[in-house]
Amino acid sequence: MGYNPLIVTSNLAIIALWGLCQFIPIPYVVNLLVLVTSILYVACHDSLVLREEQALARGETPAGGEKLAVIDRPQVETLKKEDAMQFPLMGSASLFSLYIAFKFFDPQTVNLIISGYFGLVGCAAMTATMAPLFGMILPSSISKVEIKKEIKIKHPLPEFIGGESPWDLSIDATLADVVAFIASAVFTGVYLKTKHWTLNNVLGISFCLQGISRFSLGTYKIGAILLIGLFFYDIFWVFGTEVMVTVAKNVDGPIKILFPRSLVPNAETGKIELSLLGLGDIVIPGFFPCLI
């Protein structure tokens, strides 16, 4: 099986920058540009499956007349025009809810709840990111062993709260997926315990890779609607109020990628100086190259 040399190079660049920046002072701009470019290239390449999914949904066939092969694909989502219009409203509601929580409740308790949420989501993102790697490393006789179990649970909740009944919690995975899940769970547990910036970056990179590769804007028109909404969203919440700044300063979670400006700890705080880049500044622009 052949591998795209640019994909391999980009993955190696991500791993190398993550490891080297802990010991070697890499210029902030170089670190940021190379890392973000590598993340975007890998994620956009992985998102090519979205085009095949959309073509299958439209009933299209390739030039040869044969239907596109149905293979194991990750679950993907395509944004609708209505979703793009509602996105700034839903984002505003979530942002203001966090602001109220930090204002009127104990910040440590709020962060504990948020950490639990990010722990679950981060574990899922890391599992999806690492499973292909374990699939290549482990012998095929082991990695391709399938584990299937149908689990459906009925619930009495209204559909707008609990979704459709029954809940489908069926398991359909390979042994490589299970190994990736165990490794991700251990890693996430260490992160929640230490909150070290290098571990934060691993989760942040996983969020970026999975977000871009599993989510599609569908069309440039929908992307334009989303950007216009986010433009006014940023103007209001960032420059018009203290809400965004307050939430950003208080939330202690992998919602950003951190870049060391110096490896020498500050004499007063005992910590190294870090610059950050929000995940939204990577993921939102990353949706557009996927349309090309």
Image (cartoon, grey):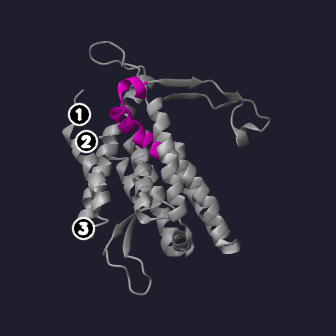
- Inspect this view and state whether residue 169 appears: yes
Q: Find disc 3 in the rendering and name its residue.
A: 26
Residue visible at 31% across and 74% down?
A: 263
Horizontally, residue 242 falls left or right of residue 21, namely: right
Structural crowding at the residue carrying mark 1, measured as other residues with C-alpha within 10 Å and reported as few (<14), some (14–19) or many (≥20): few
Q: Is residue 250 above or below residue 279?
A: below
Q: Position of residue 8 (x, y in %)?
A: 24, 42
Report if the CB atoms under discs 2 and 1 are less than 8 Å apart. yes
Amino acid type at image mark 3: Ile
Please say whether residue 256 is one of the residues in the magenta stretch.
no
Q: Find disc 2 in the rendering and name its residue.
A: 7
Residue visible at 36% across and 25% down?
A: 140
Structural crowding at the residue carrying mark 2, measured as other residues with C-alpha within 10 Å and reported as few (<14), some (14–19) or many (≥20): some
Majority secondary structure of magenta residues: helix
Q: Find disc 1 in the rendering and name its residue.
A: 3
Along the line of sight, which residue is nearer the eye, 61 or 222? 61
Please say whether residue 136 is one of the residues in the magenta stretch.
yes
The residue range painted magenta reads 125-144
Q: Is residue 209 above or below residue 97?
A: above
- Inspect this view and state whether residue 216 appears: no
Q: Pick the quarter of the image with the C terminus.
A: top left
Q: CA distance from mark 1 to mark 3?
A: 29 Å
Residue visible at 27% across and 55% down?
A: 16
Q: Position of residue 155 (x, y in %)?
A: 76, 34
Q: Position of residue 100 (x, y in %)?
A: 66, 69
Q: CA distance from mark 2 to mark 1?
A: 8 Å
